[in-house]
Image (cartoon, rainbow, N blue to C red):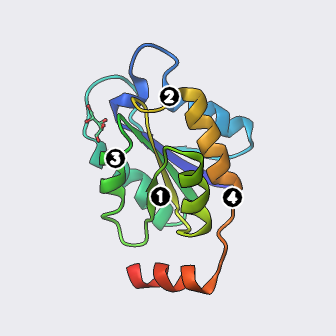
């Protein structure tokens, strides 16, 4: 399973631990192959550019799922959801992690560095990754209506 990961500068915001490398390392320790879409340092960048890179990787099949990090998880999620076929979920609670997978079949998990501790991010991401899509017809119908 391949995961594309991207963040804006919030992924490298001091104080350490820096979320993007720490989350990358966690995913690798779980056996996922990582596609690093940047950014790779603390210089200020624009979150839509990194949302685009991750979404392109998911949509062209080079990644199975995507993970995005910005300050709140909101802006980068908005940018992700401009891509047809991307279902980006802003994940801030365990229910959001679980239900965005089982009901919405979300394919990009969006996390907020300034909202969540690193441990919370990792816990939410693990729940998100470990929750399968339900494939229930009512959920599938709703997803299909979104295109
Ligand atoms: C960047 O400072 C910040 O605006 C961004 O990371 C994010 O929180 C936007 O939604």
Horizontal arrangement in the rendering, residue 119 relative to residue 9 (left or right): right
Q: What label does residue 131 carry, if any?
A: 4
Of the two numbered discs 3 and 2 on the same chain, state the one appearing first in sequence. Answer: 2
> Where's residue 19, x and y in %?
50, 28
Q: Does the residue labelled 3 lie within 8 Å of ligand 1?
A: yes
The answer to whether residue 147 is seen in the rendering is no
- For the residues carrying marks 1 and 3, which lies nearer the camera in this image? 3
Q: Name the residue under label 2.
A: 19
Of the two numbered discs 4 and 1 on the same chain, state the one appearing first in sequence. Answer: 1
Secondary structure beneath label 2? helix
In this view of the protein, which residue sits in the foreground, 69 or 92?
A: 92
- Crowding at label 4, few (<14), some or many (≥20) Cα neighbours within 10 Å? some
Residue at the image position 58 percent from the left and 61 percent from the top: 99
Horizontal arrangement in the rendering, residue 77 relative to residue 120 (left or right): left
- Crowding at label 3, few (<14), some or many (≥20) Cα neighbours within 10 Å? some
> Where's residue 112, x and y in %?
42, 37
> Where's residue 49, x and y in %?
29, 47
Secondary structure beneath label 4? loop
Secondary structure beneath label 1? helix
Reply above or below: 146 against 107: below
Q: Quadrant of the image for the N terminus? A: bottom right
Secondary structure beneath label 3? loop
- For the residues carrying marks 2 and 4, which lies nearer the camera in this image? 4
Using the numbered discs, state the Cα–Cα distance from disc 4 to disc 1 in whole angstroms.
21 Å
| Among the 4 quarters of the image, the one containing residue 45 | top left
Reply above or below: 127 against 81: above
Reply above or below: 63 against 105: above
Q: Mark 1 points at which residue?
A: 57
């Amino acid at each position: 399973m391949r995961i594309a990961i991207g963040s804006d500068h919030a992924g490298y915001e001091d104080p350490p631990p820096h979320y993007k490398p720490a989350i990358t390392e966690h995913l690798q320790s779980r056996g996922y192959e990582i596609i690093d879409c940047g950014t790779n340092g603390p210089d200020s960048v624009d979150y839509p550019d990194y949302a685009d890179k991750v979404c392109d990787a998911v949509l062209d099949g080079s990644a199975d799922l995507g993970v995005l990090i910005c300050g709140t998880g909101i802006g980068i999620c908005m940018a992700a959801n401009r891509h047809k076929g991307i279902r980006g979920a802003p994940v801030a609670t365990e229910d959001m992690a679980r239900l965005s997978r089982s009901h919405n079949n979300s394919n990009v998990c969006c996390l907020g560095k300034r909202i969540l501790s690193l441990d919370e991010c990792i816990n939410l991401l693990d729940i998100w990754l470990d929750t399968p899509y339900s494939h229930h017809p009512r959920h599938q119908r709703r997803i299909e209506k979104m295109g």
